Amino acid sequence: MDSEFQQITRDILEHPRFLQLREFVHHGEQNSVYDHSVSVAEMAYRLARKMRLSEDETASVVRAALLHDFFGYDWHGERFRRYLRHFSGVQRLARMHAFVHGHIAADRAKTMFGLTDRECEAIARHMFPLAAMPRTRIAWIVTLADKAVASREMTVALGGYMTAFYQKLFAVSA
């Protein structure tokens, strides 16, 4: 990525809390939340440049995209499962990761990196349609970049799972 992208993201990419995202698996076993977040930020940057957004708006898009999954916990882990067991029905559904992590990430990003309200709204709403509909251009770009990158990552992961399944299946029958 070019120097403008690096200048916009350097403080976040070097932050110890952001670096912890490398520990959390996301969209397949070969991908971390860190990898996913950087890919989304790069995609959002390219979209912002194609749309000829101002430097300030481009920076907002990129920072929101980079921090859109800055929730800071392993939602695949036993600790999160134990938390969910305290609820049932609609209450449980409302507390599932897909519905809450945008708001958690927005709060953490605002506290640690001083994001604007518009940037935080983009983070909180990036899970549309599971979250409220994006209302700003920044939020739409983050949402679209996330959907595109997540789709690519899940396609790769599914291919890997299917390959492993068929290798195991044919190894047993041989």
Image (tube, rainbow, N blue to C red):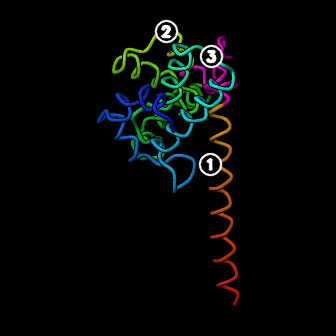
Q: Is residue 1 above or below residue 89?
A: below
Residue 167, above or below 110: below
Asked whether the residues under the numbered discs 2 and 1 touch, taking CB atoms below 8 Å apart as contact, a structural biologist would say no
Residue 152 among those drawn in magenta: no
Residue picked out by circle 1: 153
Mark number for residue 53?
3
Say what amino acid the circle numbered 3 marks: Leu
Marks 2 and 3, the one that precedes in the sequence: 3
Residue positioned most to the left: 16
Q: Earlier in the sequence, mark 3 or mark 1?
A: 3
Q: Amino acid at mark 1?
A: Glu
The residue sitting at the top extreme is 117
Q: Nearer the viewer, residue 102 or 97?
A: 102
Q: What residue appears at the point 64 percent right and 12 percent down from the top-left corner?
A: 136
Task: Estimate the x, y position of residue 128 in percent, counting from the top left.
Answer: 67, 24
Find residue 165 and report its horizontal and vertical position in percent.
66, 70
**Picture coordinates of residue 55, whole percent (x, y):** 53, 16
Cα distance in 3D space between marks 3 and 1? 27 Å
Within 10 Å of the Cα at label 2, are there few (<14), some (14-19), or many (20+) other Cα atoms? few
| Residue 141 magenta-highlighted | yes
Which amino acid lies under the numbered mark 2 shown in the image of this protein?
Answer: Asp
Inter-mark Cα distance, 2 to 3 = 18 Å
Residue occupying the point 35% across, 40% down:
19
Q: Which residues are magenta?
A: 123-144
Q: Earlier in the sequence, mark 2 or mark 1?
A: 2
Q: Residue at x 48, y 28 (%)?
A: 4
Query: The C terminus appears in which quarter of the rendering?
Result: bottom right
Q: Residue at x 66, y 16 (%)?
A: 134
Location of residue 35 in the rendering, given as x and y in whole percent from the top left corner = 49, 44
Report, in whole angstroms, how far the alpha carbon at label 2 lies from the one at label 1: 29 Å
Residue indicated by mark 2: 117
